[in-house]
Image (cartoon, rainbow, N blue to C red):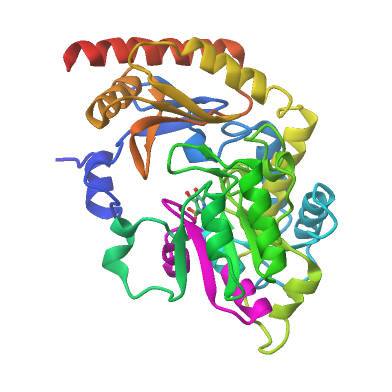
Amino acid sequence: MQISNRQLFLNHVAQVSPKPMDLEIVKAQGVYLYDTHNNSYIDFISGISVSNVGHCHPNVVKAIQQQSVTYMHLMVYGEYVQAPQIKLAKALTDLLPASLNSVFYTNSGTEATEGALKLAKRVTGKTEIICFTDSYHGSSHGSLSVMGNEEFKQAFRPLLPDVRIIDYNSIEDVNKYITSKTAAVILEPVQSETGYTVASNEFLQAIRKKCDEHCALMILDEIQNGFGRSGTFFAFEQTGVVPDILLLAKGMGGGLPIGCFISSQKLLNEFTYNPVLGNINTFGGNAVCCAASLACLQTIQSEKLMDDVERKSNLIRSLLVHPAIKNIKGKGFMLSIDFDDTDLNFKIIETCVKNGLIVDWFLFNTHSMRIAPPLIITDEEIKKACAIILKSINESVSKT
Ligand SMILES: Cc1ncc(COP(=O)(O)O)c(C=O)c1O
């Protein structure tokens, strides 16, 4: 008897939860995924904030094809002069304030977090890291240490010492807890896994002020927020603060795995001496991933994809009116649709998927639905997606 792909997946691909989504996708193009039965699904979450330019964007595919026949891996990160790395670093730093002029490449978001935490300790000579309730910055040990949720950390202790969790958007906590002992404060301008909670500008500015006062570094994690999703290339552009370290990944690669942390050359030089090779990796800045990332960045610019994010976000908000929807929060293409109840939320999400629309929940907020579409989505596709959500709510409400 032939074993199905689904069974092989369950048998041989390590599982992260008892209930994976389990779709067998054979092709992805634009905002659509197609399964083995040729059912189509609108990807309304961009594979969790990754496919900002849609799936298999021709510019990204072309860049990958060209670079992959030129060279792929040449040497561990940081040794050779490689055009794709340089072009991407130049393009990224051109978009940023002058103080963020040096890019350290990683393969993922969590490695960017790890690098930033190490850099903060190295630069300040201090150890205390401040993070926020229900923050998520990755799943490796350092990142897990600055996760603001004990339930997910408990089993993996001991983690990094000297981590203090304070309340997001609490200026009072900021003023009380950021002190001369603080090495760094890490947060997202829009906190993703609580259901896209937007930081107030006053809160971010208070953090900036306290960090300056106490020579602590402000680390902004734009791993989900960045690459246009907020309506500007970086979400912090709308806040009046500039971080000391910026984290990027996810949407950065146009579908390939790449991340980075960006800071000043002066700070990043600390990794160069005492000890030499203070932070290293093998594949960071992989030529093919950098070429894909540059194509993604240029596509966001040339197709003016950011211009329409706010309008389309408002279109989604205006279409999603239903008594079961209690609130819609977020910014740009990061929206949280809040229901009263976790069971109902899961039922609606499951029904949406059955009806051809991929939506999801949040790690630390199970009564809300995640919406984070590709930036290329059209008004017609948004209308189709929202109609599926309303239909799925009706079908789910009538069954509960
Ligand atoms: C805000 C944020 N930071 C960091 C990460 C970790 O990124 P990665 O999964 O690439 O390690 C994620 C991933 O979901 C994230 O959402």
Furthest residue to the left? 1
Q: Residue placed at 80% from the left, 31% from the top?
A: 302
**Picture coordinates of residue 263 (x, y %)?**
73, 63
**Picture coordinates of residue 108 (x, y %)?**
54, 57
> Looking at the image, is 108 positioned above or below residue 50?
below
Classify residue 40 by image quadrant. Answer: top left
Assign the N terminus to one quadrant of the image. Answer: top left
Assign the C terminus to one quadrant of the image. Answer: top left
Q: Residue placed at 84% from the left, 50% from the top?
A: 94
**Picture coordinates of residue 261 (x, y %)?**
66, 61
**Picture coordinates of residue 278 (x, y %)?**
64, 81
Q: Residue placed at 59% from the left, 70% from the top?
A: 179
Horizontally, residue 42 falls left or right of residue 254, namely left
Total number of numbered discs in the rendering: 0
Q: Nearer the viewer, residue 114 or 368?
A: 368
Horizontally, residue 236 falls left or right of residue 329, namely right
Q: Residue placed at 39% from the left, 16% from the top?
A: 389
Q: Is residue 42 visible?
A: no
Is residue 128 located in the magenta-colored stretch of the structure? yes
Magenta region, residue range: 117-145
> Looking at the image, is 90 positioned above or below residue 320?
below
Furthest residue to the bottom? 274
Q: Is residue 180 visible?
A: yes
Classify residue 83 by image quadrant. Answer: bottom right
Is residue 320 located in the magenta-colored stretch of the structure? no
> Looking at the image, is 389 positioned above or below residue 292?
above
> Looking at the image, is 3 positioned above or below residue 37?
below
